């Protein structure tokens, strides 16, 4: 997620780690961390506010994406995909398909509330 004046956040898919860079960088074809610009965890309070804002936007986008999926795929598609996934031994379970959209939206709200309260 990137926005002029705020910078860019990158979310690791495997462990959901957040990285930040103050520049606006869009890398839709990035498949691994080496494909991205160098990012760090800033100590500057303004940068941390930017991170929370971008993170809330990114999580809200994921919620919208999951909602779109729920409207277009079979109810148990996710479980079938995980069962066929070669690295499924690392999967420890998670959110039920029926709760996925609501869970992401709740997380976005929590990050947004954190922004209002500051550090």
Image (tube, grey):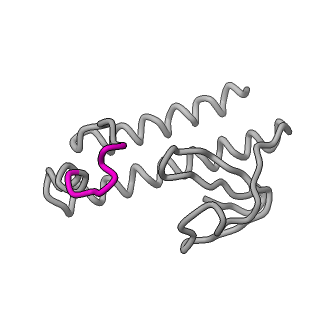
Residue 32 at x, y = what percent? 57, 63
Residue 9 at x, y = what percent? 65, 54
Left or right of residue 98, residue 67 in this image: right
In the picture as drawn, the residue positioned furthest to the right comes out as 44
Left or right of residue 3, residue 72 in this image: left
On-image quarter of the N terminus: bottom right
What residue appears at the point 58 percent right and 30 percent down from the top-left corner? 113
What residue appears at the point 74 percent right and 40 percent down from the top-left corner? 49
Left or right of residue 96, residue 18 in this image: right
Residue 112 at x, y = what percent? 58, 36
Above or below — where is 53 with respect to 27? above
Above or below — where is 94 with respect to 20? above
In front here: 117 or 55? Answer: 55
What residue appears at the point 34 percent right and 52 percent down from the top-left corner? 87
Left or right of residue 21, residue 65 in this image: left
In the picture as drawn, the residue positioned furthest to the bottom comes out as 29
In front here: 94 or 47? Answer: 94
Main secondary structure of the magenta stretch:
helix
Q: Where is residue 92, by image quadrant?
A: top left
In front here: 97 or 72? Answer: 97
What residue appears at the point 36 percent right and 43 percent down from the top-left corner? 90
In front here: 47 or 43? Answer: 43
> Which contiguous range is marked in magenta?
83-90
Residue 100 at x, y = what percent? 31, 43
């Amino acid at each position: 997620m990137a926005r002029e004046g705020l910078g860019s956040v990158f979310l690791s898919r495997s462990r959901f780690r957040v990285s930040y860079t103050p520049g606006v960088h869009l890398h839709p074809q990035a498949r691994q961390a080496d494909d991205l610009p160098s990012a760090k965890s800033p100590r500057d309070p303004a940068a941390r506010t930017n991170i929370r804002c971008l993170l809330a936007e990114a999580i809200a986008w994921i919620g919208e994406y999951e909602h779109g999926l729920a409207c277009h795929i079979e109810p148990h598609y996710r479980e079938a995909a995980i069962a066929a996934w070669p690295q499924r031994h690392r999967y420890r379970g998670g959110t039920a398909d029926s709760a996925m959209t609501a869970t992401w939206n709740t997380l976005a709200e929590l990050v947004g509330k954190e922004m209002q309260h500051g550090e």
